[in-house]
Image (cartoon, helix red, strand yellow):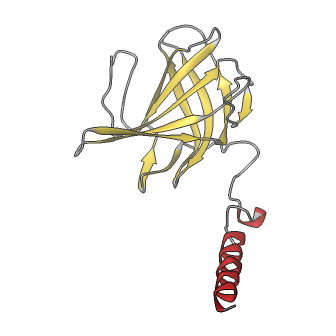
Amino acid sequence: MKLTLALSALCLMTASVAGCSSEDDPAEKTEKTGPVAATPLTGSIEGKAFEAKSAIARKGFEDGEKSIDIYDTAVTCKDFSPKAQRKILISVPWTAGTNRDFNFSLSGGDSQTATFVIHENESDTTQNIISTEGRVEIIEAPSEPGAMGKIRLRAVASGNNVEGEIAVEVCD
């Protein structure tokens, strides 16, 4: 009998703790929706301030798509493989007026994410953190190499977050 009461009490405590998770409470959800701020792209990556200084766009994996690398250092298309402590990667349809809320789907379709890339010098490892919460807006999307486009981005994942706009140099 004592064992049954003890197990019942343990199950009740476990259920009440699991039921109080902030992830399950819609009031605790912090995902922001709607248009992205038209301010400089800033935020926090790995607990350190991140202020985007440059972004470059190269051909994406699919036709009409660009793969964009965003840096907190000065980088141009002439830099072959820039070494950066932190950057953000995103692939998008390169068409002005495109607005996409993030979603992640293993089955394909219109899946949209961004990736926070963090290079750790001490261990010479790279950590990739995929953001499935956010939005990207393509403001200007020129096709000529050397031209400057513009995107607005909001991305949130594992304590990392950025929001704002940045000019994007078109490489190819």
Q: Identify the residue at image location x=55%, y=29%.
A: 90
Q: How many marks?
A: 0
Question: Along the horizontal axis of the image, is 8 left or right of 51?
Answer: right
User: Which residue is the extreme one toward the front?
Assistant: 1
Image coordinates of residue 166 in percent, x first then y, are: 54, 34
User: Which residue is the extreme one toward the bottom?
Assistant: 2
Image coordinates of residue 116 in percent, x first then y, are: 48, 40
Question: Along the horizontal axis of the image, is 139 left or right of 81?
Answer: right
Q: Quadrant of the N terminus?
A: bottom right
User: Which residue is the extreme one toward the left?
Assistant: 122
Q: Identify the residue at image location x=30%, y=39%.
A: 125
Q: Identify the residue at image location x=65%, y=75%.
A: 14
In the image, 129 versus 77, the foreground residue is 129
In the image, 79 versus 13, the foreground residue is 13
Question: Along the horizontal axis of the image, is 149 left or right of 22?
Answer: left
Give the vertical position of 60 relative to 90 (above or below).
above
Image coordinates of residue 2 in percent, x first then y, are: 65, 92
Give the vertical position of 123 relative to 20 (above or below).
above
Image coordinates of residue 107 in percent, x first then y, are: 70, 25
Question: Along the horizontal axis of the image, is 44 left or right of 12?
Answer: left
Res 9 → quadrant = bottom right
Res 8 → quadrant = bottom right
Res 97 → quadrant = top right
